[in-house]
Amino acid sequence: FPVTIQAKRLKQKLVQLGFTCYGGIDSPYSWIKTPPGSTSWEFFDFLLTRCHLLCIPGIGFGTHGEGFVRISAFTTPEKTALALERFNRL
Protein backbone atom coordinates (compact mmCIF):
# COMPACT_ATOMS: atom_id res chain seq x y z
CA PHE A 1 0.00 0.00 0.00
CA PRO A 2 1.87 3.12 -1.14
CA VAL A 3 2.44 5.68 1.58
CA THR A 4 0.88 8.48 -0.46
CA ILE A 5 -2.41 6.55 -0.64
CA GLN A 6 -2.23 6.00 3.12
CA ALA A 7 -1.59 9.71 3.70
CA LYS A 8 -4.49 10.75 1.47
CA ARG A 9 -6.86 8.32 3.21
CA LEU A 10 -5.74 9.45 6.65
CA LYS A 11 -6.21 13.13 5.81
CA GLN A 12 -9.63 12.58 4.19
CA LYS A 13 -10.96 10.70 7.21
CA LEU A 14 -9.61 13.28 9.67
CA VAL A 15 -11.27 16.08 7.71
CA GLN A 16 -14.53 14.07 7.75
CA LEU A 17 -14.18 13.86 11.53
CA GLY A 18 -13.97 17.65 11.71
CA PHE A 19 -10.23 18.20 12.02
CA THR A 20 -8.47 20.90 10.02
CA CYS A 21 -5.57 19.22 8.22
CA TYR A 22 -2.87 20.29 5.82
CA GLY A 23 -0.48 18.18 3.75
CA GLY A 24 -0.95 14.49 3.17
CA ILE A 25 -1.32 14.89 -0.57
CA ASP A 26 2.18 14.68 -2.04
CA SER A 27 3.74 14.02 1.34
CA PRO A 28 3.44 11.23 3.92
CA TYR A 29 2.83 13.83 6.63
CA SER A 30 -0.31 15.67 7.65
CA TRP A 31 -0.53 18.63 9.98
CA ILE A 32 -3.56 18.68 12.27
CA LYS A 33 -4.72 21.98 13.76
CA THR A 34 -4.90 21.77 17.54
CA PRO A 35 -8.22 22.48 19.26
CA PRO A 36 -8.84 26.12 20.25
CA GLY A 37 -6.86 27.08 23.35
CA SER A 38 -4.58 24.04 23.10
CA THR A 39 -0.85 24.22 22.41
CA SER A 40 0.88 21.67 20.24
CA TRP A 41 2.43 20.09 23.34
CA GLU A 42 -0.94 19.89 25.11
CA PHE A 43 -2.62 18.25 22.11
CA PHE A 44 0.35 15.90 21.68
CA ASP A 45 0.04 14.89 25.34
CA PHE A 46 -3.72 14.42 25.02
CA LEU A 47 -3.40 12.22 21.94
CA LEU A 48 -0.63 10.17 23.55
CA THR A 49 -2.17 9.63 26.99
CA ARG A 50 -5.87 9.47 26.14
CA CYS A 51 -5.81 7.92 22.66
CA HIS A 52 -2.45 6.13 22.57
CA LEU A 53 -1.54 7.97 19.36
CA LEU A 54 1.95 9.24 18.68
CA CYS A 55 2.52 12.46 16.78
CA ILE A 56 5.02 15.32 16.80
CA PRO A 57 4.20 18.68 18.43
CA GLY A 58 4.42 21.36 15.77
CA ILE A 59 6.51 23.67 17.95
CA GLY A 60 9.38 21.23 17.41
CA PHE A 61 9.54 22.54 13.84
CA GLY A 62 9.76 26.18 14.92
CA THR A 63 7.38 28.90 16.05
CA HIS A 64 5.21 28.61 12.93
CA GLY A 65 4.50 24.98 13.84
CA GLU A 66 2.78 25.98 17.07
CA GLY A 67 -0.92 25.18 16.95
CA PHE A 68 -0.39 21.96 14.98
CA VAL A 69 0.74 18.37 15.44
CA ARG A 70 2.30 16.36 12.64
CA ILE A 71 1.24 12.79 11.93
CA SER A 72 2.83 10.29 9.60
CA ALA A 73 1.36 7.81 7.14
CA PHE A 74 4.43 5.56 7.33
CA THR A 75 2.45 2.61 8.68
CA THR A 76 0.24 -0.26 7.62
CA PRO A 77 -3.39 0.08 6.50
CA GLU A 78 -4.42 -1.82 9.65
CA LYS A 79 -2.64 0.62 11.95
CA THR A 80 -4.08 3.56 10.02
CA ALA A 81 -7.57 2.14 10.57
CA LEU A 82 -6.85 1.72 14.29
CA ALA A 83 -5.57 5.29 14.55
CA LEU A 84 -8.69 6.57 12.82
CA GLU A 85 -10.88 4.61 15.24
CA ARG A 86 -9.10 6.33 18.10
CA PHE A 87 -9.46 9.76 16.50
CA ASN A 88 -13.14 9.02 15.97
CA ARG A 89 -13.57 8.53 19.74
CA LEU A 90 -12.49 12.13 20.33
Image: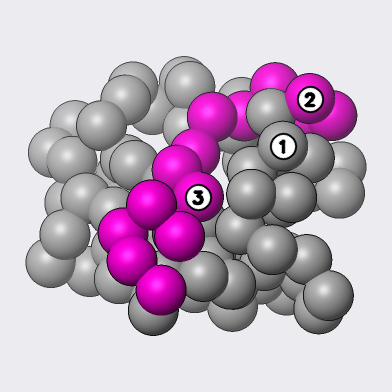
Rounded to the nearest angstrom, the CA distance separating label 3 from label 1 is 9 Å
Q: Indicate the secondary structure of the residue bearing disc 1.
A: helix
User: Badge 1: few (under 14), some or many (20 or more) residues near its Cα, within 10 Å?
Assistant: some
Write down the residue under mark 3.
57
Q: CA separation, marks 2 and 3?
A: 14 Å
Q: Are marks 1 and 2 in contact (CB under 8 Å)?
A: yes
- Location of mark 1 (residue): 45
N-term mark: 2 or 3: 2
- Residue 14 position, x and y percent, is 59, 61
Q: Residue at x 31, y 59 (%)?
A: 61
Q: Which label belongs to residue 49?
A: 2
Query: Which quadrant holds the N terminus?
Result: top left
Q: Is residue 37 above or below residue 61?
A: below
Q: Earlier in the sequence, mark 3 or mark 1?
A: 1
The single residue placed furthest to the front in the displayed view is 63
Dot 2 amino acid type: Thr
Q: Give the answer, above or below, for where 29 lies relative to 1.
A: below
Is label 3 in a helix, a strand or a loop?
A: strand
Q: Is residue 31 left or right of residue 90?
A: left
**Amino acid type assigned to the residue bearing label 3 in the image:** Pro
- Relative to residue 8, is residue 43 drawn left or right? right
Please provide the residue range marked out in magenta: 49-63
Query: Image quarter for residue 89?
Result: top right
- The answer to whether residue 51 is magenta is yes
Q: Is residue 80 left or right of residue 53?
A: left
* As drawn, 21 above or below 52: below
Q: Position of residue 41 (x, y in %)?
A: 64, 49
